């Protein structure tokens, strides 16, 4: 992301690469482990809000921050017993009100409840495409014509 912001990027309407998510991959394992995820989130925040702050537009920084907060909060809620201190840290002061609701959503909707609620609040722009992929096997990146 930093490379494209510094040197530019272009859109080519062809599939040049594919990304597969495997359950045992480094990304999947590190996103499922709250401790590893927390370390990554802190590194991203330091980079985006610190040394390379000028490279990232403010709106982009805020959106990325919400995305990494979602990832960490989802990792915490994916564990058997959610660590509430880490969850509060992940949500930050703006989204503290979500803490009690997340536990209830897990009871009512099962393990899919907290990620859906977190996505609706922290990443609303990604909610509809994510639901379409899960409900209708819509391929990632597909657009309406």
Image: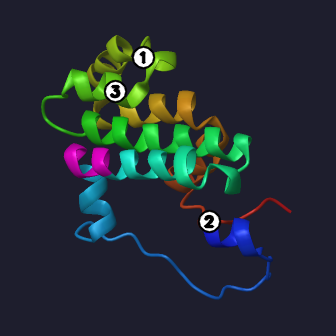
Q: Which residue is mark 3?
A: 89
Labels 3, 2: front one: 2
Q: Which residue is mark 2?
A: 2
Judged from the image, the secondary structure of the residue bearing numbered disc 2 is helix
Residue 62 is left or right of residue 22, and the answer is right
Q: Is residue 1 visible?
A: no
On residue 135, the disc is none
Residue 18 percent location from the top left of the image: 54, 81
Q: How many residues crowd around disc 2 within 10 Å: few (fewer than 14), some, or many (20 or more)?
A: few
On residue 98, the disc is 1
In space, the residues marked 3 and 2 are separated at their CA atoms by 25 Å
The quarter of the displayed image where residue 75 is located: top left
Q: How many residues crowd around disc 1 within 10 Å: few (fewer than 14), some, or many (20 or more)?
A: some
Residue 40 is left or right of residue 59, and the answer is left
Residue 145 is left or right of residue 15, and the answer is right
Residue 95 percent location from the top left of the image: 48, 19
Q: Residue at x 27, y 71 (%)?
A: 25
User: Measured along the vertical axis of the image, is residue 80 above or below residue 38?
Assistant: above
Quadrant in which the N terminus is drawn: bottom right
């Amino acid at each position: 992301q930093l490379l494209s912001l510094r040197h530019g990027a272009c859109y080519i309407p062809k599939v040049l690469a594919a990304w597969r998510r495997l359950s045992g991959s480094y990304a999947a394992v590190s996103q499922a482990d709250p401790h590893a995820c927390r370390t990554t989130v802190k590194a991203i925040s330091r980079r985006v809000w610190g040394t390379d702050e000028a490279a990232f537009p403010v709106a982009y920084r805020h959106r990325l921050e919400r995305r990494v907060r979602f990832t960490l909060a989802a990792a915490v809620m994916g564990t058997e017993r959610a660590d509430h201190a880490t969850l509060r840290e992940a949500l930050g002061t703006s989204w503290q009100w979500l803490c009690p609701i997340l536990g209830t959503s897990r009871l009512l909707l099962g393990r899919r409840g907290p990620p859906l609620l977190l996505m609706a609040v922290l990443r609303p722009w990604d909610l509809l495409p994510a639901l379409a992929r899960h409900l209708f096997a819509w391929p990632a990146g597909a657009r309406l014509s």
